Image (cartoon, rainbow, N blue to C red):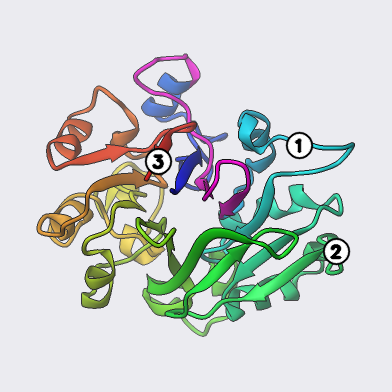
Amino acid sequence: MIEVLVLGAGGGGGFPQWNSHAPGCRRARAGDPMAASATQASVAVSGDGRHWFLLNASPDLRVQIERSPALHPQDGLRSSPICGVVLTGAEVDTVTGLLSLRERQAFSLLATAPVLARLDENPIFEVLARDVVARIAIEPGIAGPLTLTDGAPSGLRVTPFTVPGKVPLYAEGALAQPEMAREIDETIGLEITDGTSRLLFVPGCAMMTPGLRSRLEGADCVFFDATLWRDDEMIQAGLGAKSGRRMGHMSVSGPGGVIESFRDLAVRRKILIHLNNSNPLLLADSEERRIAAAAGWTVAHDGMQVTL
């Protein structure tokens, strides 16, 4: 069994974004039920419904934990059912929530070597005391167990795999010129299995590749990058000068987009996650939501639960 709890479905900044006065954000602030608010993307997975592993630690993590009873302390004066955090990258909206887990609570922090190096470079993350929070390097393509804090097996195994992406935005300033997306160990997807079912979590991906298609084929459930509906969405809305591909995200629609790329893949359940506040998929009454549903996609929402 794999239990999945969506802690947050939104992209960086969430929905509504704090400084956005765009129509969708105005609808969300007004309490429109067709424009439900969303915190920043993260999910929790469990093999027994009692011990949980976070896939990414969003800036909204403390709020996400408090509204998720399964993640509340269960024993003694201090405890947590959270046994580990697995990171898919080192972007701000992926790692900032780690700072909310600083009260000397034991758990494991798993990430690729380059991502751990990003954390090592920033002394603020030393608030995660290394004598209680183990930093464990994981290698793309190599499966390993997710273990409980006492070392016992959780019943789940994780395999990281590279996907086309880029270095974190804050690290681009050190480059001679901005780089376009490519396969690097700083952007990964995660395959979680209990030996029977396969869950894939890919919140950031710049393009589909043959290797990624092979990994996705036959999955029981896939959470996939839905940052933007169209590649020039931010540009056309006057919200930025970068395309989705330049930001490290493939669009949901259009040639080479998520819907087209998955059309002939045998995936049992397909769920879109990490939606930017500009994405019309966040609006339940939008034509884009109807198109996605017709193609077999569900849009994730905060609090969503999936059992495999």
- In the image, farthest residue toward the right: 77
The residue lying toward the viewer, choosing from 155 and 232, is: 155
> Left or right: where does residue 176 sit relative to residue 136?
left
SS for callout 3: strand
Q: Amino acid at mark 3?
A: Thr
CA distance for labels 3 and 2: 33 Å
Q: Give the crowd class for mark 2: few <14, some 14-19, many >=20 residues within 10 Å.
A: some
Measured along the vertical axis of the image, is residue 141 above or below residue 233? below
Which residue shows up at 37% across the image and 74% down it?
A: 181
> Left or right: where does residue 280 sit relative to residue 37?
left
Which residue shows up at 69% across the image and 39% down it?
A: 62
Q: Position of residue 276 (x, y in %)?
A: 41, 44
State the residue position of label 3: 307
Decide if residue 75 is in sight here: yes
SS for callout 1: loop
SS for callout 2: loop
- In the image, farthest residue toward the bottom: 176
- The reply to whether dot 2 and dot 1 touch (C-beta < 8 Å) is no
Which residue shows up at 26% across the image and 54% down it?
A: 251
Q: Give the crowd class for mark 3: few <14, some 14-19, many >=20 residues within 10 Å.
A: some
User: In terms of image quadrants, where is residue 257?
Assistant: bottom left
CA distance for labels 2 and 1: 20 Å
Q: Amino acid at mark 2?
A: Ala
As drawn, the label of residue 129 is 2
Label whose residue precedes the other's in the sequence (3 or 2) = 2
Q: Which residues are magenta?
A: 29-55
In this rendering, the label closer to the viewer, 2 or 1:
1
State the residue position of label 1: 73
Q: Position of residue 281 (x, y in %)?
A: 29, 36
Measured along the vertical axis of the image, is residue 123 above or below residue 257? below
